[in-house]
Image (cartoon, rainbow, N blue to C red):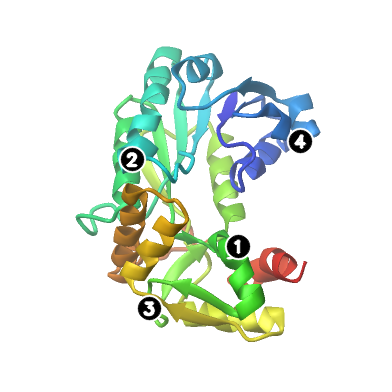
Amino acid sequence: MIVITTPTGRIGRRVVDGALAAGAPVRVIARDASRLPHRVRERAEVVEGSHGDPDVVAKAFAGADAVFWLAPPDHRAESLDDVYSRFAGPACEAFRSQGVQRVVCVSALGRGVLPEAGHVTATLKMDDLIASTGVHFRALTLPTFMDNMLGQVESIKNDGVFYSAISGDRKLPTCACRDIADAALKLLLDPSWTGRGDVPVLGPEDLSNDDLARIMSEVLGRPVRHQRISVEAFKESMLARGVSEANAQGLVEMAVAKENGLDSAEPRTPESTSPTTFREWCEQELKPAVLG
């Protein structure tokens, strides 16, 4: 039995579809079962509720061999521990009590690189907590997602600009959510791995924000430019959207860490190079969102 959290998210829904297509027994945890596609409700077991709830995870993990774990965003949380380690606490108890064998977790690059990296540091602390339960554990260690650009569709569409606190010429890895899901699925369907390890998913090449702007311009057939903003302005924009102080500060620290090489320390290998190019992602995801 494979248990999948966040089954309606960009990553989770592809993991669900892939596991069902492979004929694996699937159980999902969903806050609102009505949001699941009919095909999923027909073929998968559904446990309704939050995967931060002790009763929900105890029920969902009963008889489970493997779990796909993703901590959902909580933009109003008073601390980053509330988003990651404290949220995962009940699940960690259930991993032990229900005898879960393997956990695959959405995580981040940068272990041991910089002492403070906001959300990344909190994510890695959560990884340590999960691994301490004794499960076999794989962390998908990830750079910035291409799909995050969808959060700036309106400014790209209306003003031809996207904003970042990272400099325009800083080349960094970036990956597509579909490739993260495929890496997770491969691990979830493979019962042979043991111990603890990291699985980087780095996309096919390192690109700067100026590179991203050029590619978007070519795909969309209209000029798009990158505008760097100060970390102070970045934080103020987050606070104006209702993001908590702790979350906003964590995002600032993460951006500064990425500017200072957080995502560049992991050497690129054939195994860590995932297939979807930013141009392909723009054609298939960004262009329909902007032009639609």
Image-based side of 27 in relation to 191, left or right: right
Figure quadrant of residue 257: bottom left
Vertical side of 203 occupied by 15: above or below: above
To which residue does mark 2 refer? Answer: 78
In the rendered structure, find residue 23 and report the number of the disc placed on it. Answer: none
Residue 260 x/y as whole percent:
27, 70
Q: Earlier in the sequence, mark 4 or mark 2?
A: 4
Mark 3 and mark 2 in contact? Answer it, CB < 8 Å: no
Residue 23 x/y as whole percent:
72, 30
User: Label 1, label 4: how many angstroms apart (C-alpha)?
Assistant: 22 Å
- The amino acid at mark 3 is Ser
Residue 84 x/y as whole percent:
37, 38
Determine crowd level at label 2: few under 14, some 14-19, many 20+ residues with C-alpha closer than 10 A: some
In the rendered structure, find residue 150 and report the number of the disc placed on it. Answer: 1
Determine crowd level at label 1: few under 14, some 14-19, many 20+ residues with C-alpha closer than 10 A: some
In the rendered structure, find residue 167 and report the number of the disc placed on it. Answer: 3
- The amino acid at mark 1 is Leu
Task: Name the one closer to the observer, 141 or 224.
Answer: 224
